[in-house]
Amino acid sequence: MTAPLKRVAMRRPGASLLSAKAEDWHYGPGFDGARAIEQFNAFADLVASCGTEIIWIADDGDGLADAMFTHDPSLVSDHGAIILRMGKPGRMGEPALHAKAYRDAGIPILGEIVAPGSVEGGDCVWVDRTTLAVGRGVRTNQAGIEQLAALLAPHGVTVLGFDLPLGHGAEACLHLMSVVSPLDEKLALVYAPMLPVAFWQLLKDRGYTLVEAPRDEFDASNGLNLNVLPLTPGDVLMVDGFPKTRALMEQAGCKVRVFAADALCIPCEGGPTCLTRPVWRE
Ligand SMILES: NC(=O)NCCC[C@H](N)C(=O)O
């Protein structure tokens, strides 16, 4: 999850975000579609300037405001893409957009999650090449985890499920990636009070060093201080405005870049990892 980001799928927000009503999407105070688009454009320029190729999924006014969070409707393994099935009802139309993008790009599709299963990409964390940790919560259920395990087992990948807390309730976005961001091969930023204990133990057993994000910045950022995107190992991109979290990552040896996201990420509940679906890291 931290090797150099070579290729990524993204969707530039447009008509769908501009016409979105905050109350329909659980967007918080500060949501401003036009400013969010400006902030997204600056973010996308930063990603592209690091040499990452972007596969663009178009926003043609389909009304899918959350579709800019391309991390969630699909997952990519060494054995092909997996088309997921969303737990948030308003996002059900998004996996078909990803299936089309993969077909158009000639990327093989390993399989898909079907009803009654649901899995969102934000709940999936590769602990190493053959271990996928999956958060079981509001967005991802046991049936989905079992389907994912069946797709990946023939390729030697073990899928492990970990229960998530309810957090701020069923409407709010809480993924496993809301409480952990890998930063370098064996280094991760975590919000310790909400980590599933067995997942925390697994990370320690696998030799991870854990940087603990401070509670005040986690609360002030709606959890987005924790959502950090590695561009290459230890070279990471985060939402601006959270100096304590930034300093802790720098003390752990990371180079930290920031982008303005008060209209984009904090009200819409998704950060730089959520805005990108890594397709190839190497
Ligand atoms: N992986 C992520 O954490 N994605 C963020 C998705 C935010 C979006 N508003 C949602 O509720 O699904």
Image (tube, rainbow, N blue to C red):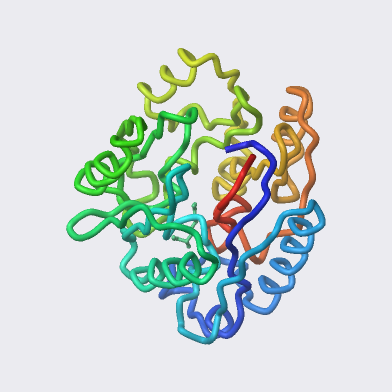
Q: Is residue 87 left or right of residue 274?
A: left
Give the left or right position of residue 277, taking residue 152 as reference: right
Residue in the foreground of this view, choosing between 26 and 157: 157
Residue at point 45%, 66% (across, down): 98
- One can see residue 245 in this view: yes
* Residue 68: % across, % down: 55, 67
Coordinates of residue 183 in the picture (x, y in percent): 64, 33
| Picture layout, residue 151 above or below residue 209 | below
Give 105 or 16, whichever is nearer the viewer: 105
Q: In the picture, which quadrant includes the C terminus?
A: top right
Q: In which quarter of the image is residue 164?
A: top left
What residue lies at 75% left-to-right and 48% top-to-bottom?
241
Whether residue 162 is visible: no
Q: Where is residue 189 in the image (x, y as percent from the top left)?
A: 60, 31
Q: Residue at x 38, y 71 (%)?
A: 96
Q: Determine whether 30 is above or below 77 in the image.
A: below
Based on the displayed image, in which of its 4 quarters is residue 254 positioned? Answer: top right
**In-front residue for pair 28/270:** 270
Quick check: 235 left or right of 267? Answer: right
Report x, y in % for residue 49: 82, 57
Residue at the image point whose x is 45% and y is 76% from the top: 64
- Asked if 282 appears above or below 131 in the picture, the reply is below
**Would you identify the image quadrant in which residue 216 lies?**
top right
Which quarter of the rendering shows the N terminus?
top right
